[in-house]
Image (spheres, rainbow, N blue to C red):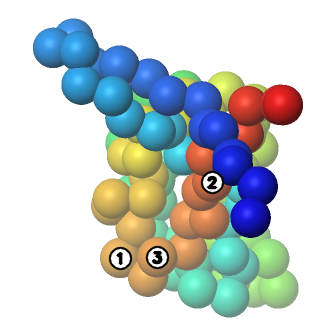
């Protein structure tokens, strides 16, 4: 197995943490509740209609800071977030 390195952040107290950035919202799991829209401070998500159903869509994924707020409030676990690899 290759060693894989991921980008790490640091809290104010110096603790390390690994941000996980939005990859996509699972359309099958999303209920369109809008909680991700409410908690995201960076405007990553918006609610859209797809086949007569409301779902969340990551319209500004590049704005994601990887803090996991959306993932924590998503009851159906529709947020697919991944850490960013450091190129080796």
Residue identifier under label 2: 82
Which percent across, then down, holds residue 23? 72, 55
* Horizontal side of residue 69 vs 77, given as left or right: left
Q: Is 26 drawn above or below residue 24 in the view shown?
A: below
Name the residue that disc number 1 marks: 75
Task: For marks 3 and 1, give the CA distance.
Answer: 5 Å
* Label 2 secondary element: strand
Task: Name the quadrant containing residue 84.
Answer: top right
Residue 77, disc:
3
Image-quadrant location for residue 61: top right
x then y, percent, for residue 6: 62, 38
Is there any visible trace of residue 46 in the rendered image?
A: no
Please say if 29 is above or below 67.
below
Foreground: 73 or 19? 19
Q: Is residue 67 left or right of residue 3?
A: left
* CA–CA distance in space, label 1 to label 2: 18 Å
User: Which quadrant: the C terminus?
Assistant: top right
What residue is drawn where x is 71% and y is 79%?
Answer: 27
Q: Nearer the viewer, residue 78 or 51?
A: 78
Say above or below: 24 vs 54.
above
Mark 1 element type: loop
- The mark lying in front, picked from 2 and 3, is 2
* Residues at marks 3 and 1 touching, judged by CB atoms closer than 8 Å: yes
Q: Earlier in the sequence, mark 2 or mark 3?
A: 3
Relative to residue 2, is residue 15 drawn left or right? left
Is residue 82 among the parts visible in the rendering? yes
Q: Are there few (<14), some (14-19), or many (20+) residues within 10 Å of tag 2?
A: some
Mark 3 secondary-structure assignment: loop
Determine the residue positioned at 40% across, 67% down.
Answer: 74
Nearest to N terminus: mark 1 or mark 2 = 1
């Amino acid at each position: 197995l290759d060693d894989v390195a991921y980008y790490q952040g640091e809290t104010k107290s110096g603790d390390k943490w690994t941000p996980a950035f939005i990859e996509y919202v699972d359309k099958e799991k999303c209920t369109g509740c809008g909680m991700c829209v409410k908690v995201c401070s960076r405007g990553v998500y918006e609610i859209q209609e797809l086949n007569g159903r409301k779902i969340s869509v990551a319209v500004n994924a590049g704005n994601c800071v990887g803090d996991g707020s959306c993932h924590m409030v998503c009851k159906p676990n529709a947020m697919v977030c991944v850490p960013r690899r450091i190129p080796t």
